[in-house]
């Protein structure tokens, strides 16, 4: 009962409530593999299998795989803090691998799962140093117990292989003994056992050589590159048999190649496990899963690796299931996986030659207030253009990715907000490039627009390779004004074609935005991205509004700029923009 409570998977509807509401895509916007035929894309269902800790997650995986308890004749116990034993157990298909602490009792969730499965036997993987006698006895209760153990982890792997393949195997997989990330995916291979080489993968221990001789395979396949299993060790392990290797450029790609081997046909479900650093617990417990491959993600909230993304796009699974709780893989990772299968369609672009368009822009973030602003924009379906500071993107990568994922434009406001006119051309270029590099590093496209801090630019700034986007409406929101003053100023001064400058680093601005949206819409304005407001912007253009664009080919002195409006309203001079205050990188957790 306890396990059942702990292990209830988070259903897809629960996740989708907080999700990104876009329709299934029918048109590809990104085909990771140029040569592969482009399949029809339908957004997969997303779900999660998890418990509150690694032990309970292994129970949840067991309940998922062995929903029929009669299918499990055995239960295997592996220690939950070192993964070698659990990893090699993937070839055992007659029961789940449940993780336990070495010798500090049996978690209640594990005991309950053993009671549910009522196996004929409870088997510890490894000797008492891995799972102590007291733990095994407590887990087994009145059921028969046994051990699959050698004197070393290599010996334990050989014992597992002997049990899983009593009649020998046509293929044997070898991985390095110090379980490397490359080996994580080995659990999904069921056509042959996984044996361990020496700690560094550069020698074949006698017990492993003996196991290979007993299994008498025709193929010996190393998992991982030569850094994980040396060529000499592979040759020695093969000992005259056909050697081969499954390896990618990194652990994530290796996992997808193992997945392709383990599941060569259509894949209807893909499991996603955390594989970065040494956070492997859920991935190794997943070795028992047979309904689909396990591929790896960066936890808890990292950018989905390109190899994993490409695999998902190519396979088009109908369901993607995260293993482990949100502290292992957050919901954003699942959304990234969903979008990798079915990239969201590009939104319909407004035609601002027909509509009265206005662009809302927000500078100096991402900040502590930006998420609240994004909530407002999402609930009212308003796109915004953010001119964000690279240094803040570094501090708040999740907010940055969210803004991009929700259809906003994330553009360049330099790395740390200097007055560019005090810098040389190369100094200015460094500021812009460094900010773009930061966007790329958090998984957001490099910018196409630049807003110079303080609206301060010179002839060098026009040579930085981007249009300069200034503004025509400035409520001076940073200057201690109330939300109602900000709203009133914006609504009074905005005209068709306006670019409105605000700051998502200012709480009162975020308070004012719902009213600004309502008022502008009531006056018939359509809120759009700057790139839709002003078509065909080119590097070196200076843009104050849709109607006030100086093309790159024309000289312009910043001192000569005054703002004009199509209907002759005095919009006042171009004002200075807010002083910028950076957040300290250590002060924010995202
Ligand atoms: Ni600024």
Image (cartoon, grey):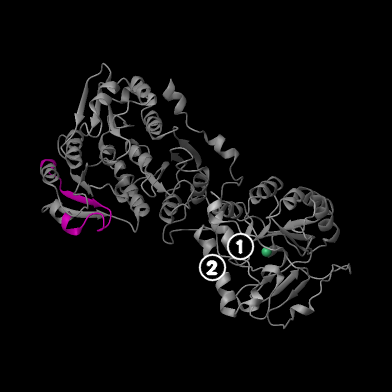
Q: Nearer the viewer, residue 367 or 548?
A: 367
Residue 547 percent across, percent down from the top left: 78, 70
Q: Is residue 421 above or below residue 117?
A: below
Total marks drawn? 2
Secondary structure found at label 2: helix
Q: Residue at x 37, y 22 (%)?
A: 112
Residue 126 in percent (x, y) is at: 22, 34
Quarter of the picture holding the N terminus: top left
**Mark 2 residue's CB less than 8 Å from ligand 1:** no
* Numbered label attached to residue 530: none
Residue 30 in magenta stretch: no
The part of the image, by quadrant, that contains residue 90 is top left
225 inside magenta stretch:
yes
Whether residue 26 can be seen here? no
Q: Is mark 1 within 8 Å of ligand 1?
A: yes
Residue 256 in the figure: left or right of residue 325: left
Say which residue label 2 marks. Answer: 434
Question: Which of 485 and 40 lies nearest the eye of the viewer?
Answer: 485
Write down the quadrant of residue 423 in the picture. bottom right
Residue lying at 69% horizontally and 82% vertically, measured from the top left: 553
**Nearest the eye: 375 or 427:** 427
Give the residue at x 36% y 47%.
278
Question: Ligand 1 is in which quadrant of the figure?
Answer: bottom right
* Depicted 552 relative to depicted 110: above or below: below
Measured from the top left, where is residue 392 in percent x and y?
Answer: 59, 58
Magenta range is 214-233
Relative height, residue 385 to residue 468 (above, below): above
Camera sees residue 401: yes
The residue to which callout 1 is attached is 389
């Amino acid at each position: 009962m306890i396990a059942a409570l702990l292990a209830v998977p988070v259903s897809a509807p629960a996740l989708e409530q907080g999700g990104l509401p876009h329709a299934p895509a029918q048109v590809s916007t990104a085909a990771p593999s140029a040569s592969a035929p482009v399949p029809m894309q339908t957004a997969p269902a997303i779900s999660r299998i998890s418990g509150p800790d690694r032990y309970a997650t292994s129970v949840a995986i067991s309940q998922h795989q062995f929903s029929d308890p009669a299918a499990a004749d055995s239960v295997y116990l592996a220690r939950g803090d070192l993964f070698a034993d659990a990893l090699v157990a993937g070839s055992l298909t007659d029961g789940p691998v449940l993780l336990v602490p070495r010798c500090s009792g049996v978690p209640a969730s594990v005991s309950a799962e053993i009671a549910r499965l009522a196996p004929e036997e409870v088997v510890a993987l490894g000797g008492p140093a891995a799972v102590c006698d007291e733990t095994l006895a407590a887990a087994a209760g009145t059921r028969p117990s046994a051990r699959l153990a050698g004197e070393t982890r290599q010996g334990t792997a050989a014992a597992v292989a002997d049990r899983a393949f009593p009649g020998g195997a046509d293929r044997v997989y070898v991985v390095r003994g110090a379980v490397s990330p490359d080996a994580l995916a080995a659990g999904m291979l069921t056509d042959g056992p996984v044996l361990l080489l020496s700690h560094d993968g550069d020698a074949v221990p006698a017990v492993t050589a003996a196991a290979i001789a007993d299994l008498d395979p025709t193929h010996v396949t190393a998992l991982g590159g030569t850094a994980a299993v040396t060529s000499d060790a592979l040759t020695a392990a093969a000992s005259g048999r056909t050697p081969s290797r499954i390896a990618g450029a990194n652990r994530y790609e290796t996992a997808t190649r193992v997945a392709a081997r383990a599941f060569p046909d259509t894949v209807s479900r893909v499991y996603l496990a955390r594989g970065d650093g040494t956070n492997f617990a859920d991935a190794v417990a997943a070795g028992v899963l047979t309904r689909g491959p396990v591929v790896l993600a960066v936890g808890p909230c990292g950018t989905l690796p390109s190899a994993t993304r490409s695999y998902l796009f190519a396979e088009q699974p109908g369901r993607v299931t995260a293993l482990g709780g949100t502290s292992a893989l957050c919901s954003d990772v699942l959304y990234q996986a969903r979008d990798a299968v079915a990239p969201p369609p590009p939104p319909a672009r407004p035609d601002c030659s027909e509509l009265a368009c206005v662009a809302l822009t927000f500078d100096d973030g991402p900040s502590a207030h930006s998420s609240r602003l994004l909530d407002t924009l999402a609930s009212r379906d308003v796109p915004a253009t953010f001119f964000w500071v690279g240094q803040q993107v570094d501090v708040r990568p999740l907010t940055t990715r969210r803004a991009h994922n929700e259809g906003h434009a994330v553009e360049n406001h330099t790395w740390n907000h200097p007055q560019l006119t005090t810098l040389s051309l190369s100094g200015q270029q460094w500021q812009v490039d460094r900010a773009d590099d930061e966007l790329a590093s958090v998984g957001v496209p490099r910018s196409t627009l630049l807003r110079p801090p303080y609206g301060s630019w010179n002839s060098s700034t026009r040579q930085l390779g981007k249009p300069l986007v200034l503004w025509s409406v400035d409520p001076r929101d940073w200057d201690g004004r109330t939300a109602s003053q900000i709203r009133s100023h914006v609504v009074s001064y905005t005209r068709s074609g306006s670019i409105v400058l605000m700051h998502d680093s200012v709480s009162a601005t975020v308070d004012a935005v719902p009213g600004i949206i309502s008022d502008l819409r009531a006056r018939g304005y359509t809120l759009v991205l700057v790139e839709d407001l002003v078509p065909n912007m080119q590097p070196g253009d200076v843009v104050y509004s849709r109607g006030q664009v100086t093309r790159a080919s024309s000289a312009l002195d910043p001192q000569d700029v005054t703002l004009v409006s199509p209907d002759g309203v005095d919009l006042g001079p171009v004002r200075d923009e807010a002083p910028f205050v950076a957040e300290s990188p250590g002060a924010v957790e995202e």
